[in-house]
Amino acid sequence: MDKLSDKLNLRNDFPETTYEEWKKVVEKDLKGAPFGKKLITKTYEEINLSPIYTQEDLDKIKTEEAFPGFYNYIRGSNAGGYHTCKWNIAQELSYASAEELNVALRHDLERGQYVIYFTPDKATLKSNDPDNSSKVDVGMGGTSLVNISDLSIALKNIELNKYSVYINAGFSVLPLMSMLIAYAKEYKIDTKNLKGKITTDPIAYSLENGTLPVDFKTAFDEMASALKWCIDNKSGIKTIGINGLPYINSGASSVQELGYVMSTAVEFINQMLSRGFKIDDIAPYFHLNLGIGTFYFMEVAKLRAARILWAKIIQAYGGIKESEKISIHAKSSNYNQTKYDIYVNMLRNTTQAFSAIVGGADSISTYPFDSTLGAPDEFSRRIARNTQIILNEESHLGHVIDPAGGSYYIESLTVEVAKRSWELFQSVEKDGRMLKSVEKGIPQSAIKKVAGQKKSDIAKRKSILVGNNAYANMTEDKPVAKDSKQNEFFKKRVENIKKYRSEKRKSSFAELSGLSGTELMNSVIDAFAGGATIGEVSRSLHGRKKSIEIPALDIHRASEMFEELRDASFAYKEKNGHFPKVFLSTIGPLKQHKARADFARGFFETGGFDVIYEKGFNTPAEAVSAAAASGAKIIVICSTDDTYPELVPAIAGGIKSKAADAVIILAGYPKEQIEEHKKSGVDDFIFTGADAYALLKKLIDKLNQTSGVQK
């Protein structure tokens, strides 16, 4: 037996095929169908994805000339990649009480979490005390923090200078950072050793909430005061975090998220420069907070493109090389999380974390799989945390510097995302920059358009949400939101703050409204150290300043419409003792009806319908008799286009004669036969591309109305 030679040269045995030769073969296989229509994929970013990429694509964009740690940072800000600096596992913890937050923090920090990461509740983000807040704001979305006593409880027995601290601070960094510094000083912690990120983005806050508690000038003044304090005190806390999550969570494309984030960054830079700062003084205190979706390659490209654009912006301002580097925190998007079949969220979170790592994020957080039902438990937090640990320690993703580097596809996509995001950024600049664009509602309208396209594709099942608009799990119980005991918590917090005010020494601190810069920050720190509450500080800071209104983004989850259908089907079951029934009138042998019957079952189960799927009937009379006996109000005829002209009149007519209110649906859409089938009694049609949501909603609403189910 001949041995293989030591050197194997496949080029000698397999001739090289050019792109043009490959395309000719493909066009032949397409049998006349347009190449562009069949094999070119257009994304929501208006990017055309080719079916194949080659070295020629790389030669056009010259990304191979870039190196990790060097301009334009497409391959990462750090020359050693994750070899020299691993990404931070930064799982966000959102519990209403400081006590719960402390328990979760201490537990998770001992088990792989690298960061103290929490979000205050809505009341705190508005700088309101609980007794001066709406009940729904207290404990909503995060932790109720009124003063350093609350912060002391939240951080009890945690070495603050051992970990990075991440806080979502809403529209102003000043109150929460001052509270943190006051806490550190009280416990003799050197504030120069504190490090972390406090995300403050008044533009994103206003878009998310439709309002800003103060005017933008005040918000930027407070941003500048905190920044000045950080510069003077050489703080390791990054205080200006541009937040992309409201965009992606309202259905924006990756280009829109990145373009508006960069426009916001330039707005913030200009606001700070106009207040006397220099670009290289402020750049180190910026960071990006980007959402991560489920389109794996697009998300990888987005993170890589973000570094390109930031470097380009800083270069335009004349910044030094170090200022061209930007820290990126990546967080899984709530837009893709679902409340039905919630365990699929684990898979979504895994791909999102994977793309964030390959894209070179500096820190990552993913949602616990049950976050759509309320505060996570220890198990779901562990799964979310361990996802990143496994990707690092078992999948070894941290062992390769820029694993996407050199990929024909990803490199090309990165450059295209950067190009289109830059074009959007330039468009915003022409419209008067980000602040004016937001006030005019321009980004909101653009995002609404893309979100509408996504919604349409989900409704038509062109875009798949596993467990929701496809592959529904009909054996699961109705998801039940966890009882947050919000009423009890609100009452307790109001009582606590009133008791605190009555027992503490009267707060005496200087009027804050006329101060600025480091002087203002130090005064706010002293106020918290003296026992002031966040509401008292806010009133002294803002006085009678009025809030402003901004057209809000429509933040939602993609699966909500199909969850609405499933909820309605459970409501029907509670009233009638069973789910709404759909009978499949399958005619002929298996090969004649199976394909469309399987499609019909999957179609109706996404709406929570109980699909009765029996073997094929030999005659229309048998099918009519079985349909009548099933008690179903909806009957779907399943066969082939060739047999429909003969079968449909007999089946539809027979069923209508027994139950005039029955809804007859045909599986398929034979265009030449449509009108005749309608005359025979067919009420609707299901097919690939049909608006599943619209039809299912119409059917379930009709059934619930007939049954007396209250909406």
Image (cartoon, rainbow, N blue to C red):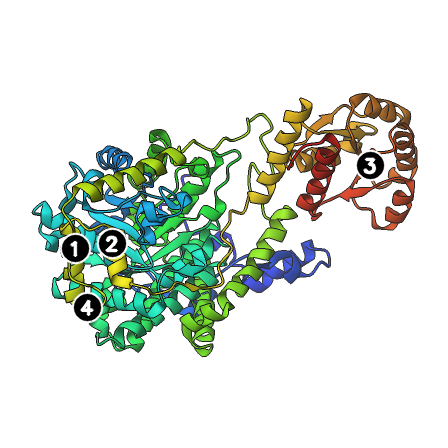
**Do labels 1 and 2 touch, CB within 8 Å?**
yes
**Residue labelled with disc 4:** 515
Q: Is residue 672 visible?
A: yes
**Residue labelled with disc 3:** 664
Q: CA distance from mark 2 to mark 3?
A: 65 Å
Q: Nearer the viewer, mark 1 or mark 2?
A: 2
- Within 10 Å of disc 2 (Cα), the crowding (few <14, some 14-19, many 20+) is some
- Within 10 Å of disc 1 (Cα), the crowding (few <14, some 14-19, many 20+) is many
First in sequence: mark 2 or mark 3? 2
**Residue 711 or 308: which is nearer the viewer?**
711
- Within 10 Å of disc 4 (Cα), the crowding (few <14, some 14-19, many 20+) is some
**Do labels 2 and 4 touch, CB within 8 Å?**
no
**Residue 527 image label:** 1
First in sequence: mark 2 or mark 4? 4
Q: Is residue 330 above or below residue 517?
A: above
Q: CA distance from mark 1 to mark 2?
A: 9 Å
**Do labels 4 and 3 touch, CB within 8 Å?**
no
**Residue 536 image label:** 2
Q: Is residue 245 above or below residue 636?
A: below
Q: CA distance from mark 4 to mark 3?
A: 73 Å
First in sequence: mark 4 or mark 3? 4
- If the image is split into quadrants, where does the N terminus sit? top left
Label 1 sits on what residue type? Ala
Which image quadrant for residue 633?
A: top right
* Horizontal relation, residue 150 to residue 438: left or right: left
Q: CA distance from mark 4 to mark 1?
A: 13 Å
* Horizontal relation, residue 507 to residue 644: left or right: left
Q: Is residue 501 above or below residue 178?
A: above
Q: CA distance from mark 3 to mark 1?
A: 71 Å
